[in-house]
Image: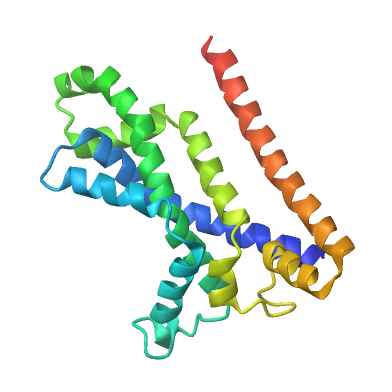
Amino acid sequence: MLRIVTLSLQVSIAAVGIAALLGLPLGALLAVARFPGRQALIIGLNALMGLPPVVAGLLVYLLLSRSGLLGSLGLLFTPGAMVLAQAVLIMPILAALSRQVLEGLWEEYAEQLRSFGAGPCRAVPTLLWDGRFALLTVLLAGFGRASAEVGAVMIVGGNIEGFTRMMTTAIALETSKGDLPLALALGLVLMAIVLGVNAAAQGLRDAAARSAG
């Protein structure tokens, strides 16, 4: 069980990190910049927030298969493929939610930043830093989606025992086998991890609020 839990955490944390590197700056840029096609991009990101996991898994599978663009990397049915699938799934969520969070900050700081000659590209890092505690909620949403994922990681990981089996895929497998005690134990561990991460993030926000006050 320890190996399954460890792999689940490693994959989900890595996926959130990769998705954050792409999604948060994109969300911040959409919050501050005005350009042709911006509204269409926002609509697209909002739509992709509801992307079915099996569709994301299928797209990554096709990308990593032997005939795919990245087939030569040999990532299919490895933890790396599961990280990529989860990152594809949650990146639109992080981008769309961070845009909503940072638009309020931009309205507050826009005039001041413009007076310093800061364009959109220079304003993005400032907004990300000032909104870092508010963005914790966005990252938690991404982590929650990643840690609960089954379909995409099942397709690209194969649920191989001792190699790509995660908590969610193990719960689905053990339930189908009738081993409900193990499935329930894994479910409780997963819930405890999610609650622990949320509690830690809330503690950070509270500490920041006290120091600011």
Identify the residue at image location x=86%, y=69%.
179
Q: Please state if 96 lies on the left or on the right of 168 as rendered.
A: left
- Pinpoint residue 177: horizontal percent, then vertical percent: 81, 75
Identify the residue at image location x=34%, y=51%.
47
User: Is 147 or 16 nearer to us in this picture?
Assistant: 147
Q: Please state if 17 lies on the left or on the right of 100 as rendered.
A: right
State the residue lying farthest toward the bottom.
66
State the residue lying farthest toward the top.
213
- Pinpoint residue 162: horizontal percent, then vertical percent: 74, 77
Which quadrant holds the N terminus?
bottom right
Q: Quarter of the image holding residue 147? A: bottom right
- Residue 37, above or below 196: below
- Pinpoint residue 122: horizontal percent, then vertical percent: 23, 36
Identify the residue at image location x=41%, y=29%.
131
- Residue 6, above or below 128: below
User: Is 165 or 20 nearer to us in this picture?
Assistant: 165
- Pinpoint residue 170: horizontal percent, then vertical percent: 74, 68
State the residue lying farthest toward the left.
36
Identify the residue at image location x=50%, y=63%.
53
Q: Please state if 204 lies on the left or on the right of 192 as rendered.
A: left
User: Is 184 or 13 nearer to us in this picture?
Assistant: 184
